[in-house]
Amino acid sequence: MNPTTYWIWYPGDFSIHQGMLQNFAREERGMGWPAYWYIDDCNRNVKFSRTYNLDKPTEFKVYAHGTGYVDINGNKHRLGESLKCDPGRNVITIFVGNTTGLPCVYIDGTVIKSDNGWQASNFVSTFSAGNDPLFTKKDQDPNVIEYQKIKVQPARIQEINNGVLFDFGRAVNGSLRLKLHQSDKVTICYGESQTEALDVGMCYYKQDDVDEKSVIRRRAFRFVFIPNVKKNQVALIAIHEYVPKNNISEFKTDNQLINKIWDISTETLNLCSDVFFIDGIKRDRWIWAGDAYQANFINQYSFFNEDVDKRTLLALRGQNDIKQHMNTIVDYSMLWVIGVLNHYEMTGDTNFLKMVFPKMESMVQYFITQTNEKGFIYGRKNDWIFVDWSEIDKEGTVAAEQALLIEVYKTMITCGSVLDKPIGKYQVLHDQLLGNFIEYFWSSQKGAFIDSYESGKCHVTRHANIFAILFDLIDDDKKQSILNNVLLNDGILQITTPYFKFFEQDALCKMGHQDIVYKTIVNYWGGMLNNDAVTFWEEYDPTKSGKDMYAMYGDPYGKSLCHAWGASPIYLLGRYFVGLYPTRPGYREFNIEPNLSNFKKLHVVLPVKSGKVTVEKDGENLSVIATRDGGTLIVDNHKYALAANKELSVQLK
């Protein structure tokens, strides 16, 4: 196999098509549940083109999924046949249509091959053809995801409640192989928790009348309960399915609890990021823009998988025409735009930015059409102003939404500048909105931003105030006021979702309060471990116990116990404790600004673009080595340049 040869398609189409299938994968209590928002699919007919100037004759074959033909200098040829090009200029055009799946081609040859040089057109727009490292062999079908499979034996089997409970000791995303002895058919009850699996009447997944020949679909579980049998009557093996990802990150310290939190966070993100960043493996299995936004921050400090993030961004956005907000949520659409900038800063991938920028522009124009004379964005009919599962005053325009829109305009200014696009209109919109945001939502009396000025309630929650700090929308005096009056004020409603815990802890670290964040990681995420968590949850409320811990959305087992945003300690520890962050896109330059007072000993390996950074601490000795140039170590306000593969050691005060 030539590693530079790929299956190719119209850019974004693979992600859009597979994203549609992913969003149709949800099952609830025996029913299929396709996502309840508008979903695009791929283009149905695509034209691939390229011109070669050849010094000598060459041959190639074109394989396709779909129907079509190959045009060489105006002459048509069949797909799958050996084709010849003579020396000189050769214009090759391949037409492929597919009514049911992704139209794509694989061009097999020594000179003429499907590498990065092809253009793809949907007969309206033309871009560089898309490809994916998952599909580099001609016998593959990009319409079918190839999962690796491993057998998982039960870690514990016990007879209980007149049945047999299988504990696999980990979260499994896959199917079961059933062996029956002295029993014809059984009922299979699944659970992320033991409590759920034993609840035969209400467990989220259950399959009745199962025998050894039954089709058992892919589900997520840790526990399986089979009622009305004995141990000697039934045997189970789980088949876990996954897409392999490389992970060079390590986090080992003298604190075993932190080590375990890092490892469980890694397992959580790994499970929720096969082809896309999905929210959770059991319940939704959908691609949510808010979950994905956070997942890539975490990904940046663990797997550093650029492809999962690109697929997710493309799947969420769909085709260029916009019919509604992503997942119907206004704030999620805005987080998508901001997320593109984070991807660029992480990867330095200008080609991807160039390809996706037109879709960013049309998305932002969609926002602008639902702003009022003050520049404030509001919810329209069928829009969901989400922000968080919290008691936010959402009467009229909402402060948190305006903070996001300001950051959207900043994103367009930055990305437009990279691509030499006109940015003047975004600067004007940014300045107007920022001024009005402070004028109408800042309360001098509260020393903080209120949720809504139109309701007259002067209600303060953490959310808009957190965004104001994270996006640098205010001066240092106002940041300090928010810190004292909101973030450190127990009288302000606490956040219970790991989703907004991510943003809150990010803001606290940015304000220099790693001490508080460290305690939160230990208590909040450690609290889930105390409740036998093998992955981190969608929500954790320390005041709840027993069966109540697993309830959400009015469902006794509606809470996801393996949720991507629950993995945020990876980001917090990597970004603010190890202190690694890029200062130029793609880590052409980066800083390491450690804050490691909580650890006497530490060994950490974190990825950077095209390399890695290793940080060691032993008492007051700190050593750092990076495998690429561009790094700067900052300790006690002193800056030390890092040369590639040269260890640098300093003494901590």
Image: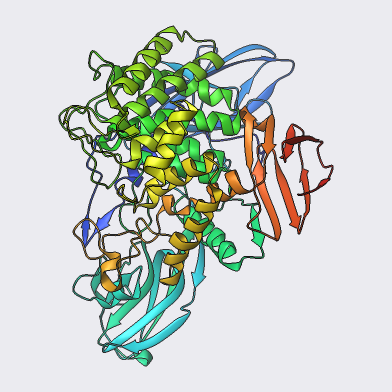
* Residue 390 x, y percent position in the rendering: 26, 47
* Residue furthest right in the image: 646
Percent across and percent down for residue 115 are: 61, 29
Q: Is residue 21 above or below residue 93?
A: below
Q: Nearer the viewer, residue 63 or 477?
A: 477
Can residue 14 be seen at all in this image of the molecule? no
Q: Which residue shows up at 30% across the image and 39% down it?
A: 387
The image quarter containing residue 175 is bottom left
Furthest residue in direction front, as rendered: 445
Can see residue 645?
yes
* Residue in front for this viewpoint, 239 or 62: 239
As drawn, is 585 to the left or to the right of 203?
A: right
Q: Position of residue 296 (x, y in %)?
A: 49, 41
* Vertical comparison of 553 with 388: above or below: below
Q: Residue at x 46, y 68 (%)?
A: 529
Residue at left offset 70%, top offset 14%: 87
- Quarter-wise, where is residue 254 in the image? bottom right
* Residue 229: quarter of image: bottom left
The quarter of the rendered structure image containing the N terminus is top right
Instruction: Name the side, left or right, on which 493 lies relative to 9.
Output: left
Task: In the rendered view, tell whether residue 10 sits above or below residue 394.
Answer: above
- Closest to the observer, 68 or 345: 345
